Image (spheres, rainbow, N blue to C red):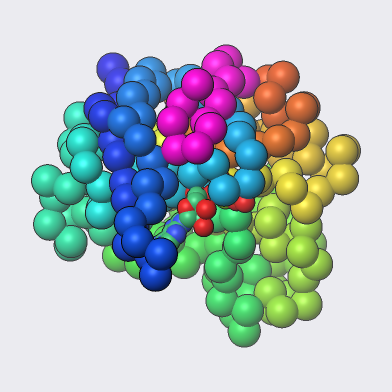
Amino acid sequence: MSALVFDRVSKSVRTTEGPRRILHEVNLHIEKGRFVALTGRSGAGKSTLLSIAGGLDAEYEGTAAVHGHDWRSLKDGARARQRNAAVGFVLQIPRLFSHLSVWQNLTAPAWIAGHAADTSRGEKLLARVGLGAVSKRAVSGLSGGERQRLTVARALINKPTLLLCDEPTGNLDRQTGGELLDLLVELQKEEALTIFVVTHDQHVIARADTVLTIKDGALV
Ligand SMILES: Nc1ncnc2c1ncn2[C@@H]1O[C@H](COP(=O)(O)OP(=O)(O)OP(=O)(O)O)[C@@H](O)[C@H]1O
Ligand SMILES: [Mg+2]
């Protein structure tokens, strides 16, 4: 079963200097339970590709399907539900509710989906990312690396089948990054989680089943 399939995905945007091509006929096939890393220079199109993969950006040509559903064939409400149920996101710039607590942020995807959070899963995830002791603290008091770890735990709270991460270890020291990576690989095995991660971190790349490179909007 394919977790993520791109069939000739292209994207262009209009800029003041005229149209600009960001992605060009990207084909991609990721089987369920695989760990795939995506590398490429700054501006190559990595974050754009990830946004389309997760249904955050539906302005593209071609097909981008998660578990057989092209994002664009879903109406806005259905797309949001599918995203919340199936996809976990770790964005390049963490977006957290800074006035809310660590626990409230962690469990936000559950209440957005309209159900109570799985408390024992939440506690386990927080402990695994080293934030078990600061559960009640406001996010505004966390360091950059702590915020990044919280976004990874939050991305996993709804038990997604596809995890999309943009530089998840970018702000972490080697040991902390390694622990986070261990958690991901463990969930890949235990929960058949499919992981698609944008990274330049050689330790992450070394653990991936497949490494893809994007250059000027095309996979090479
Ligand atoms: N809406 C937009 N309008 C104009 N240009 C855009 C838009 N979105 C992305 N771009 C441009 O497309 C290119 C690819 O952007 P993207 O964010 O995907 O790069 P990236 O590979 O993630 O880079 P980085 O490693 O710096 O995060 C960049 O040059 C960016 O400026
Ligand atoms: Mg990026």
Is residue 188 depicted above or below 70 in this figure? above
The answer to which of 149 and 12 lies nearer the viewer is 12
Is residue 49 in view? yes
- How many numbered markers are drawn? 0
The image shows residue 155 at horizontal and vertical percentages of 51, 51
Is residue 211 depicted above or below 123 in this figure? above
Based on the displayed image, in which of its 4 quarters is residue 111 positioned?
bottom left
The answer to which of 95 and 211 lies nearer the viewer is 211
Q: Is 81 positioned to the left or the right of 207 in the image?
A: left
The image shows residue 170 at horizontal and vertical percentages of 74, 48
Residue drawn at 60 percent across, 63 percent down: 94
Q: Is 35 positioned to the left or the right of 168 in the image?
A: left
For this orientation, the residue located farthest to the front is: 17
For the N terminus, give its image quadrant: top left
Based on the displayed image, in which of its 4 quarters is residue 2 positioned?
top left
The image shows residue 96 at horizontal and vertical percentages of 57, 70
- Does the stretch in magenta take in 76? no
The answer to which of 157 and 51 lies nearer the viewer is 51
- Does the stretch in magenta take in 209? yes
Is residue 206 depicted above or below 69 in this figure? above
The answer to which of 12 and 55 lies nearer the viewer is 12
Characterize the magenta stretch by its predominant secondary structure. Answer: strand
Bounds of the magenta segment: 208-220
Is residue 89 in view? no
For this orientation, the residue located farthest to the bottom is: 99
The image shows residue 138 at horizontal and vertical percentages of 69, 78
Residue drawn at 87 percent across, 38 percent down: 174
Based on the displayed image, in which of its 4 quarters is residue 151 positioned?
bottom right
Residue drawn at 56 percent across, 62 percent down: 106
